[in-house]
Image (tube, grey):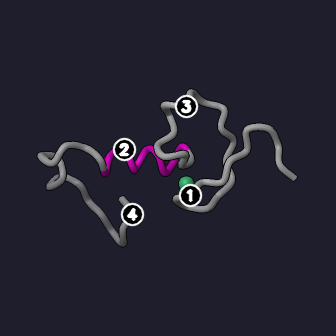
Amino acid sequence: MNLNNTEICPCCGNEYIKNLPPETYFYDCCEDCSFWLEKLYLPEQYSNKQVIVGGVH
Ligand SMILES: [Zn+2]
């Protein structure tokens, strides 16, 4: 049963409630994934400071 504003995250596959402003969500991913995806898309000069383990920050 779908509740209002319930979305499936295309990134992790989890259901989440889309109750924050649209700009919070990166590519319709859940809040958690969006948080990390934004970091992945940081400018190149920061990329050497990222720590990625198994494709996850
Ligand atoms: Zn997700």
Q: Is residue 53 left or right of residue 31?
A: left
Residue 36, x across and y down, in percent: 40, 49
**Of all residues shown, which one is farthest toward the top?**
21
SS at mark 1? loop
User: In the image, which disc is placed on residue 10?
Assistant: 1
- Nearer the observer, disc 1 or disc 2? 1
x, y percent for residue 35 = 43, 44
What's the amino acid at mark 3? Pro
Residue 22's tag is: 3
Q: Which of disc 4 and disc 2 is earlier in sequence?
A: 2
Q: Is mark 1 within 8 Å of ligand 1?
A: yes
Between marks 1 and 4, how big is the CA–CA gap?
A: 15 Å
| Discs 1, 3 touching: Cβ within 8 Å | no
Task: Say what amino acid the circle numbered 4 marks.
Answer: Val
- At horizontal 51% and vertical 48% (from top left) the residue drawn is 32
Magenta range: 31-40
**Residue drawn at the location 69% of the way across and 41% of the way down:** 17
